[in-house]
Image (cartoon, rainbow, N blue to C red):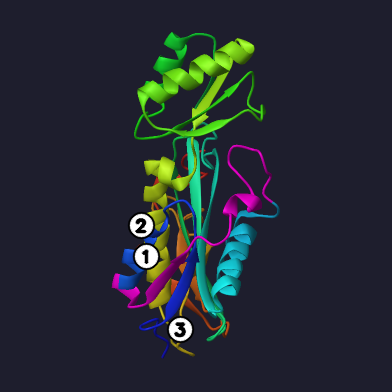
């Protein structure tokens, strides 16, 4: 049976993510995390838009893990990548999704821990210091750092990592002198955004759970819920609903799968299209 215990995984990051991830993985999985910052990960994309990310979120995480493995010569690596946008439910909330990938070429597997929750990535175009002050307080400043640039959100004259009021006032004045307008936004780098750092920690917890869930058939990690079989009958009319009546768990290595029932024989009428159209 597989175990991470004693294995060394390299973690490439320049933004302090190891503080949220390494102790957790080492405690729960018994592995050792070797942190490296030997590559500028901003070259793979920046939240402040100087460089566009190539590929998907998981592609970027895999690339970071591979670069860390190449730098150290290790066959095991982890890396994370975040994304921000509207929430997938209403489209109205600010939403942060974090992925933490674990690659083990020695044992031939890849796992991904995922966490998503409301995030803090506000922005405002300010015409006065009073507006800037008001925005900063709403944006969680100074615990959440800010980015300032003159004119508009694409201006390359940018100052990141602003973390105290004196520095913010100076940056505002410089940007205002340059253009008469100041674009201010949350700094989304992990070390500058406590809300995001917590989401990364939750992704690490998800990764640990998957690494400890071993396939009953081959013993590989990552045996996990893959899909639902929907159609749980309504408790009033008996018609199928969209509520799950069973779960399909799958192994990513040998493709063994198992169907598991849910702890309910029927669904509430509130979930029924017939009783609650």
The one of 236 and 67 positioned closer to us in this rendering: 67
Does 143 appear above or below 14? Answer: above
Would you say residue 85 is visible in this rendering?
A: yes
- Bin the neighbour count of mark 3 within 10 Å (Cα to Cα): few under 14, some 14-19, many 20 and up: many
Residue contact at pointers 3 and 1, CB within 8 angstroms: no
Residue contact at pointers 2 and 1, CB within 8 angstroms: yes
Residue 182 left/right relative to 247: right
Q: Nearer the viewer, mark 3 or mark 1?
A: 1
Does 60 appear above or below 193? Answer: below
- Residue occupying the point 36% across, 69% down: 25
Upstream in sequence: badge 3 or badge 1: 1
In the rendered view of the protein, which quadrant contains the N terminus?
Answer: bottom left
Label 1: which residue? 22
What whole-number distance in Å separates the C-alpha atoms at marks 3 and 1? 25 Å
User: Where does residue 156 sit, x and y in percent of width and height?
Assistant: 66, 30
Q: Which residues are magenta?
A: 27-53
The one of 171 and 223 positioned closer to us in this rendering: 171
Labelled disc at residue 215: 3
The one of 238 and 128 positioned closer to us in this rendering: 128
User: Where does residue 16 sit, x and y in percent of width and height?
Assistant: 42, 53
- Residue occupying the point 36% across, 56% down: 20
């Amino acid at each position: 049976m597989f175990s991470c215990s004693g294995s060394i995984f390299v973690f490439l990051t320049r933004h302090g993510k190891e503080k949220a991830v390494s102790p957790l993985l080492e405690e729960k999985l018994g592995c050792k995390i070797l942190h490296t910052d030997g590559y500028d990960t901003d070259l793979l994309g920046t939240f402040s838009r100087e460089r566009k990310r190539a590929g998907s979120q998981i592609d970027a995480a895999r690339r970071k893990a591979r670069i860390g493995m190449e730098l150290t010569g290790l066959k095991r690596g982890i890396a994370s990548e975040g994304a921000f946008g509207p929430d997938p439910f209403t489209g109205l909330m600010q939403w942060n999704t974090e992925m933490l990938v674990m690659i083990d070429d020695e044992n031939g597997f890849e796992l991904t821990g995922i966490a998503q929750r409301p995030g803090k990535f506000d922005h405002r175009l300010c015409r006065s210091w009073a507006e800037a002050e008001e925005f900063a307080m709403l944006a969680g400043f100074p615990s959440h750092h800010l980015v300032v640039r003159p004119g508009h959100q694409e201006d390359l004259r940018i100052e990141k990592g602003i973390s105290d009021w004196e520095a913010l006032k100076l940056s505002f004045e410089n940007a205002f002198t340059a253009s008469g307008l100041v674009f201010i936004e949350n700094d989304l780098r992990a070390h500058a955004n406590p809300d995001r750092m917590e989401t990364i920690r939750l992704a690490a917890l998800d990764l640990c759970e998957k690494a400890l869930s071993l396939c009953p058939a081959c013993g590989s990690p990552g045996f996990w819920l893959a899909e639902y079989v929907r159609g749980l009958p309504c408790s009033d009319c008996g018609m199928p609903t969209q509520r799950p009546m069973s779960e399909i768990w799958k192994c990513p290595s040998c493709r063994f799968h198992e169907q598991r029932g849910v702890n309910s024989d029927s669904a509430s009428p509130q979930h029924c299209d017939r009783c609650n159209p």
